[in-house]
Image (tube, rainbow, N blue to C red):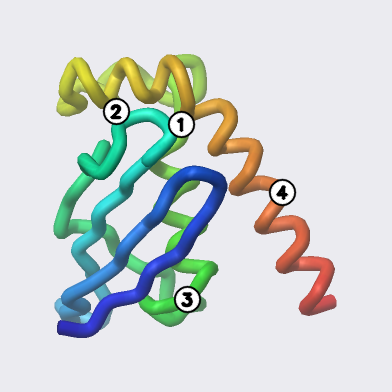
């Protein structure tokens, strides 16, 4: 199985099982935050649509996924978080802002490197 692992802080994002549908690449993902939940994943899914500007197995794809997973209640309408489990909502409340900031810093650093 093809997979890509990206570390940020205490967390790891694993992207795997790319598939191509209607001209887009979709991957499955697992997000673990060892500092918060040990080895258990906080988020898993098989529906992340990778931007056509990014390879599925790249830091850009992992950071894009994290930018979606780290939004908080004040940043999106209430419908966005409806499918979250109580544990995921607690993670969003306790840790999402910190990881959102880390994602922002990593994206800025990558943009400076490529400029």
**Sequence-wise first label, 3 or 2:** 3
In-image side of 25 versus 20 (left or right): right
Q: Residue 41, percent across and down?
A: 23, 43
| Dot 3 crowding, Cα within 10 Å, few <14, some 14–19, many 20+ | few
Mark carried by residue 71: 1
Q: State the residue in front, 25 or 94.
A: 94
**Alpha carbons under labels 3 and 4: distance apart:** 17 Å
Crowd band around label 2 with a 10 angstrom C-alpha radius: few (<14), some (14–19), many (20+): few
Tag 3 and tag 1, C-beta contact below 8 Å: no
Which element type, helix, strand or loop, lies under badge 1? loop
Q: Secondary structure at mark 3?
A: loop
Label 2 near label 3: C-beta < 8 Å? Answer: no
Q: What residue sits right under mark 3 in the picture?
A: 58
Left or right? Give the position of 15 relative to 67.
Answer: left
Along the polypeptide, which appears first: circle 3 or circle 1? 3
Q: Which mark is residue 80?
A: 2
Task: Work out whether mark 4 precedes mark 2 in sequence or the reverse, and give the earlier one.
Answer: 2
Q: CA distance from mark 1 to mark 2?
A: 9 Å
């Amino acid at each position: 199985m093809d997979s890509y692992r990206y570390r940020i802080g205490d967390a790891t994002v694993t992207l795997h099982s790319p598939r191509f549908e209607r001209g887009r690449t979709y991957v499955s993902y697992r997000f673990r935050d060892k500092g918060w939940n040990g080895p258990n994943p906080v988020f898993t899914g098989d529906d992340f649509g990778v931007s056509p500007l990014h390879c599925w197995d790249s830091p850009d794809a992992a950071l894009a996924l994290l930018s979606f997973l780290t939004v908080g209640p004040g940043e999106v309408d209430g419908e966005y978080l409806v499918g979250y489990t109580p544990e995921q909502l607690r993670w969003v409340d306790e840790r999402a802002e910190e990881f959102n900031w880390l994602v922002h810093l990593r994206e800025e650093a990558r943009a400076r490197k490529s400029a």
